[in-house]
Amino acid sequence: TDEDFKAVEEAVYAFAANLEKVAPRRAADLLFDWSLHCEERHFRKQAAMRGYEESKGIYAVLGDEGRVAQIALNRGNILASLSRFPEALEAYAQAEAVFRSLRDERSLAQISANCGIVFQSLSHFPEALEAYVQAEAVFRRLGDERSLALIALNRGLIFSSLSRFTEALDAYAQADVFYRKLGDEGEVANIALYRGNVFFSLSRFAEALEAYENADAVFRKLGDESRRANVAWSRGNVLSSLSRFPEALEAYAHAEAVYRKVGDEGRRARIVLNRGIVFFSLSRYPEALAAYAQAEAVYRELGNEAELASVAWNRGNVFYALSRFAEALAAYGQADAVYRSLGDEGSVAAIACRPDVQRRGNE
C-alpha cells in the first residue's frame, strides 16, 4: 500500500542520514540503490527522483563524477518517461559532458539512444533516426544485443508513426529475434502490443485484438500495470473503431487511472484525445471539443507537434460535422502543415482523401 511504502521510504532516509555521518559513500550507495529499487520494482518515479537527488549531493562532495553523471542519466530517463522532455534533454547533456571527459563510450552511446527516444516522442523523427544510427554503431561493436533490440524496436515505432507499416513490422521482427534470444518475455510481449497497433492501423482489428490479448496475459503474469495500461489504451482504440463505445470508454478509463497515478501526462493526454474521438462518434460534440482542448493544453506544454496536429485534425472533424466549414478547413490546414513538416505522408493523404477521418494516437 501507499502507506506501507511511505513508512519504508522514511525508514531508509532515516538510516541513510545516520550512516552518512560515519560512512558517507555507503549512505550514498544505499540511497542510489533505493532509487533503482523504486524505479524498477515499484514504478515510484517521484520517489526515485528524490533518492537520486539526495545521493547526488553526497557523491558530489566525494568527487565521484562518474556516479553523478550516472544519476543525471537516470534522472533523464525518468523525466523522459514522464514526458518532461526539455528537462530530460538537459539531464542527458549534463551526463554527456562528464562521460565524454571520462571517455566512456558505452555511456555516450546510451545517451545518444535515449536522446533518440526523446526526439521520437517529440515526433522529431529525422533527429531520432540519426541518434539511433550513432548509438547502434557502438552497440554493435560492443556486442550489446539488448541495446540493439531496443533501437530496432524504436525504429519500428517511428516507421509506424510515419505509416510505413511494412518497415515497421520488419523492424519489430528484428527486435523480436533479439529479445527471444535474451529470454526477455516482457519485451516479446511488448512487441506483440506494437505489432497489434500496426494491425489496428491497417484495420485488421481481429488480429490486433488477438495480439493485445497475448501481450496482456504476459503483463498480467509479470504484474506490469504500466504496460497493461498501454494494452488497455490500444484495445480501446480498436473497440472505438468497431463502434463498441462503452467498452472503449471503459478501457480508456483503466489506462488513464494508471497514467495519472504514475504522473505520465503525455499518455494521459492521448487518452483524453481518444475519449474525445468517442464523443465525436456519438455526436456529443461539445464534450469532444472540451476533451480536445484539455489534450491540446498538455501537448502545447510538452511541445509535441504531432499530437497538436492530431488535435487540430479531430477538431476539424467536429467543425465539419457541425457544417462550420471555414473552421474545419482551417483546422485541417494546421494539421496538414505539421504532418508535411514531419514527413508523415500517410496522414497528409488521409486529410486529403477523408476529411472526417479520426486520428487516434497509439503507443
Image (cartoon, rainbow, N blue to C red):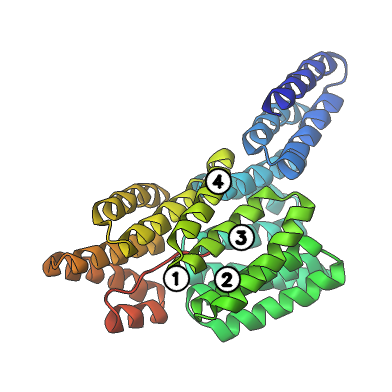
Checking the image for residue 231, the label placed there is 3
- At horizontal 78% and vertical 53% (from top left) the residue drawn is 222
Question: As shown in the figure, which amino acid type bears the numbered disc 4?
Answer: Tyr
Residue matched to label 4:
259
Left or right of 301 on screen, residue 34: right
Question: In this rendering, does residue 360 appear at all?
Answer: yes
| Secondary structure type for disc 1 | helix
Q: Earlier in the sequence, mark 4 or mark 1?
A: 1
Tell me if label 4 and label 3 are in contact, CB under 8 Å.
no
> Real-space Cα distance between discs 4 and 1?
22 Å
Mark 4 vs mark 2: in front = 4
Q: CA distance from mark 3 to mark 2?
A: 15 Å
Q: Position of residue 253 (x, y in %)?
A: 50, 49
User: Disc 1 residue type?
Assistant: Ser
Which residue does the numbered mark 2 point to in the structure image?
157
Determine which residue is flagged by label 1: 241
Horizontal side of residue 86 vs 5, given as left or right: left
Q: Amino acid at mark 2?
A: Leu
Instruction: Give left or right: position of 240 versus 197.
Output: left
- Please tell me how crowded label 3 is: few (under 14), some (14-19), or many (20+) other residues with Cα within 10 Å: many
Task: Using a 10 Å C-alpha cutoff, classify the residue at mark 4 as few (fewer than 14 neighbours), some (14 to 19) or many (20 or more).
Answer: many
| Label 4 vs 3, first from the N-terminus | 3
Residue 188 sits in quarter: bottom right
Mark 3 or mark 1, which is nearer the start of the sequence? 3
Q: Amino acid at mark 3?
A: Val
Q: Residue at x 67, y 37 (%)?
A: 44
Q: Position of residue 357 (x, y in %)?
A: 33, 74
Front label number (4 vs 1): 1
What SS does tag 4 mark?
helix
